[in-house]
Image: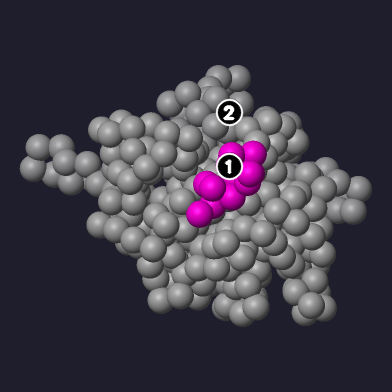
């Protein structure tokens, strides 16, 4: 799957992943009113609104980007109907030939990790039948439990040609409370990065591993260090736009071949119409505002990489 991701990045010339993290406050009133008229102000109504909102954005941007990243918590908050909207979104994105990164941040040990991995990346056996329940292409994984927590995911990835992005240095302000702590004179995130590189060598593509890393765009100098430590690791880079990072901050996350990283923007794309720069599109033009935000983000990143 890493080869497909790279191919799609090269085709679109946009190392961008759109974070499909819907919240009701992002959804235009007309979509909400229609869903509530049909389903009531219920979990089912909220889930229907989320799905219709997502579909509009996907239809507007799928030809511009290689991948999407739905954050499962934004769907789980609406219970089973929300998870059904999540699955519907995953399936629709795959119909559009987008790479799907399930932002699920799972992490446990033994049979629990194996069950998470089977549910999201592999298959489960039910009597004589086999099913791929969520069937994302990649998922995010929390490495806090060490190899015991990650290896079951790697095993399923190898069996089904899927991939991971393991949390290494996250973009949130308090990430340093643990991740920057010195261990034998070096910050913990470096030790985690080296371990991810080790896990990745067990599941390599042609040039890059199927086992990637999440590295926050808000810490470009740390990204530079990790890029040197992990030359064959693909980086998923959150923090662009709403969290403050711009194209110029991203150069260190890429390799000299212009590959090695894919940059996430969530609110900056899906709620673009609520930003001053795209307000002229209005609520009815929310999806076209998202398209313009993707085009602007692509140009910003491309200009930054070409200036190096």
Q: Quick one: 88 or 32, which is closer to the camera?
A: 88
Residue 116 in sight here: no
- Of helix, strand and loop, which one carries label 1? loop
Q: Quadrant of residue 264?
A: bottom right
Q: Identify which residue is drawn at 49% across, 39% down.
A: 142
Read off the magenta span.
182-194
Q: CA distance from mark 2 to mark 1?
A: 49 Å
Q: Residue 46's mark? A: 2
Q: How many marks?
A: 2
Q: Residue 41's mark? A: none
Magenta span has 183?
A: yes
Left or right, 184 with reference to 27: left
Judge the density around disc 2: few (<14), some (14-19), many (≥20) Cα neighbours within 10 Å. many
Looking at marks 2 and 1 on the same chain, the residue that comes earlier in the sequence is marked by: 2
Q: Quadrant of residue 114?
A: top left
Residue 7 in sight here: yes
Residue 307 in picture, x, y percent from top left: 82, 78
Left or right, 51 with reference to 287: left
Q: Identify which residue is drawn at 47% across, 58% down.
A: 197
Q: Residue 184's mark? A: 1
Q: Quadrant of the C terminus?
A: bottom right
Magenta span has 225?
A: no
Q: Quick one: 155 or 185, which is closer to the camera?
A: 185
Residue 60 in picture, x, y percent from top left: 65, 60
Which of the two discs, 2 and 1, sits closer to the camera? 1
Q: Quick one: 203 or 305, which is closer to the camera?
A: 203
Left or right, 145 with reference to 159: right
């Amino acid at each position: 799957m890493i080869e497909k991701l790279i191919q799609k990045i090269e085709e679109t010339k946009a190392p961008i992943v759109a974070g499909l993290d819907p919240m009701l406050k992002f959804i235009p009133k007309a979509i909400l009113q229609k869903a509530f008229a049909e389903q009531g102000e219920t979990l089912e109504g909220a889930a229907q609104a989320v799905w219709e909102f997502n579909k509009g954005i996907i239809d507007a941007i799928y030809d511009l980007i290689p991948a999407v990243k739905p954050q499962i918590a934004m769907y789980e908050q609406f219970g089973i109907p929300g998870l059904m909207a999540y699955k519907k979104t995953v399936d629709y994105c795959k119909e559009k030939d987008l790479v799907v990164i399930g932002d699920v941040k799972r992490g446990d040990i033994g049979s629990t990790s194996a069950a998470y991995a089977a549910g999201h990346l592999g298959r489960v056996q039910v009597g004589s039948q086999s099913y791929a329940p969520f069937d994302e292409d990649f998922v995010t994984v929390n490495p806090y439990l060490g190899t015991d927590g990650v290896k079951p995911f790697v095993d399923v990835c190898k069996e089904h040609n899927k991939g991971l992005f393991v949390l290494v240095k996250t973009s949130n302000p308090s990430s340093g409370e643990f991740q920057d702590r010195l261990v034998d004179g070096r910050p913990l995130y470096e030790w985690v990065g080296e371990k991810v590189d080790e896990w990745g060598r067990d599941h390599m593509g042609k040039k890059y591993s199927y086992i990637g890393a999440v590295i926050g765009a808000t810490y470009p100098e740390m990204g530079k260090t990790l890029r040197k430590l992990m030359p064959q690791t693909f980086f998923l880079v959150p923090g662009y736009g709403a969290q403050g990072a711009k194209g110029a901050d991203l150069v260190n996350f890429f390799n000299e071949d212009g590959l090695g990283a894919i940059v996430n923007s969530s609110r900056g794309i899906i709620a673009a119409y609520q930003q001053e720069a795209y307000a002229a599109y209005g609520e009815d033009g929310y999806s076209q505002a998202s398209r313009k935000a993707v085009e602007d983000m692509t140009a910003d990143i491309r200009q930054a990489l070409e200036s190096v």
